[in-house]
Image (cartoon, coloured by chain):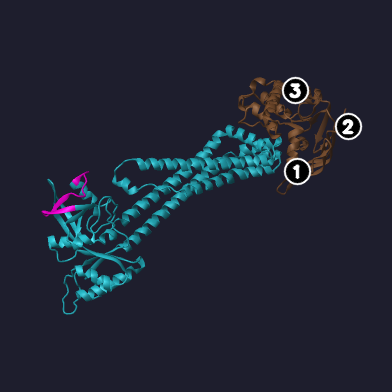
Amino acid sequence: MGTPIIKMQEIKKVYKTGEVEFEALRGIDLNVDNNEYIAIVGPSGSGKSTLMNLMGCLDTPSLGRYHLEGQEVETMTSNELAEIRNRKIGFVFQAFNLLPYASAYENVELPLLFSGMSGRERRRRVNEMLARVGLSDKLANKPTEMSGGEMQRVAIARALANRPKLILADEPTGNLDTKSGQSIIAIFDELWKSGHTVIVITHDTNIANNCQRIIRLKDGVIDNGNGRP
Amino acid sequence: MRLSILYNIFARDFKKQRKRMLLTLMAVFWGTMSIMLMLGFGEGLKRQLTARQKGMGEGIVILWGGQTSIPHQGFGRGRRIHLLENDIAYLRNTVPGIEMIAGEYIRWGAEIKYKEKVLSERINGVFPEYRELRHMYAEMGGRMINHYDIDGKRRVAYLGDRVKERLFGPDEAVGETIYIRGVPFLVVGVMQHKMQMSSYQGRDEDVIVIPASTFVAIFGDPYLDDIVYKPVSTDMAPTVAEGIERMMAIKHKFNPDDDRALSTWDVIESQRVFYNIFLGIQIFLGIIGALTLLIASVGVANIMYVSIKERTREIGIKMAVGGRKIYILTQFLLEALGITFFGGFLGISITYIITEVYKRIPLESEVLDFMGKPTISLEIGLIVAVILGIMGILSGFFPALRASSVSPVEALRYE
């Protein structure tokens, strides 16, 4: 299999609110290989989102070591982390997190702007990604003019824009109706088949069972070993 | 940092967030304009009043004869003290510190005739020093009374600009002959229009001035009506006044402590009072200006503040998709600077246009005349715009700095 895309060792995350400390993750060891399709499940407060944010380099662990494609993440500067988020990771949020004032096109373009891509290349890439999620006819729509399912597809297109290997989705269907949710999952299936590594947090057992591997979190630790079948 | 990246992000968001930018811009613009206008009109008013204050003359004292109230050298009280023409030379020679001194004769309601027009006007018999002492400068093509006129008892007249209007209308007056009490006088000059706020005998625009020697020859007045003098400096004024009192007491034989024997109007003193009053007005305007600035600052801060939540999310999103901190912060800084620059520029320009238009309004009104010409100060405009800009940066940039210093997760979670 070669180097794992994600290699986590003894990862801990502690939140401090004033005097109170809360240990959200209490020692996670996890390897993810290329082109895996993983569901992370677990009750609320079990640390799913925290783990996901750490994987996505949106947050840094309090303790432990994290290698992403062989690179040591916890020693990186904020600029290097930004670079990683920009190039290597596509993140899909439950709350979409689109820029409200920008159109679908402009939202997808955002990571490409930060990676410094030329104008013509950007235009081609945005159109390609929006076509891939079936929104070629909604380029100019703003988030307020779209349904939840459409917004999430814009968010996926944005996550794909710089062609990252790793796609992370934090309850991508949590705010959607069943039908829209199914279409989003269909896109993830298709991404996995085309060679991406996809990791999805979900409450939905159907979605979880659809994946290759399920990781169960409970109280900040992985409950089911490495989750491999 | 790559400038092209920054430019792309900035240009795009600038277009997208036009409404908020325009509101902030308006706040900076409005603050700059209102403060500049207020202080500009205040400055104009001050200059106007100062010019009027100087209309009668600057740093002068006027002296009249009075009545004694203390018996002295065998004379009883109640004796009138009359000013004589030879007092002038006497005082000039005996009292140090006098820069200029002149006497004047006044005749109220003398009959003036030009062609068919007959008017009753005030006539002053004056000396050449009067021109400087009382700021009576002639319009182009004319002159004030000079010492040749005095020596030759010439029958020449110098007209206040309003008298000239009454007698001649728009026609040329210099070179024409008018009749004072039936005696022909050649008009040699017309006074430049001047603003005059105070007077002791009516405004100078209403007077007809002739040489003192001619005046005495025609009207036969034995006494001067008043003496006007100017000390070499305002600091010298009390010493000079005391010297004059003392020397006049010797010459006219009255008790030097008798403060009724002569009466004076110290214009220097009243000008000082006036300047103090105006200083008060300026401080008042300054306070109002500061308050306006405060309100405008609060406006700017408010607009920035209400958008912190939205903007913190925006920063979180940008960081999550790989935006570096430097791009995000520079964008905010550029926004604040741009708003300051354009808002300030707009405020200063519009203020300039308003004042220029105002100056061109051809309204003849006493009130507008008193308002003077608004004088805007570029420095004040720049200071105001910069202060508002700093407010914008403080209230916009620092929340952005905080948002971009935490992890993207925290920024996204901001409520």
Residue under label 1, please give it. A77
In the figure, the brown chain has which letter? A
Question: Residue A184 at x, y = what percent?
Answer: 73, 23
In the rendered structure, the answer to whether residue B359 lies left or right of residue B138 reads right
The quarter holding residue A173 reads top right
Write the start and end of the magenta stretch as one range: B168-186
Residue under label 2, please give it. A2
Q: Nearer the viewer, mark 2 or mark 3?
A: 2
**Three-letter amino acid code of the residue under disc 3:** Ile
Q: Residues within 10 Å of mark 2 (few under 14, many from 20)?
A: few
Asked if residue B78 is positioned above or below residue A44 in the image, the reply reads below
Sooner in the amino-acid sequence: mark 2 or mark 3: 2
Question: Residue B249 at x, y = what percent?
Answer: 23, 74
> Mark 2, chain letter?
A
Q: Residue at x 44, y 44 (%)?
A: B34
Q: Nearer the viewer, mark 1 or mark 3?
A: 1
> Mark 3, chain letter?
A
Q: Specify the quadrant that holds the N terminus of chain A.
A: top right
Question: Residue B83 at x, y = what percent?
Answer: 19, 68
In the rendered structure, the answer to whether residue A104 lies left or right of residue A21 reads left
Residue under label 3, please give it. A187
Q: In the orientation shown, which residue stands out farthest toward the left?
A: B182
**Three-letter amino acid code of the residue under disc 1:** Thr
Is B175 a magenta residue? yes
Question: Which tint was used for chain B?
Answer: cyan
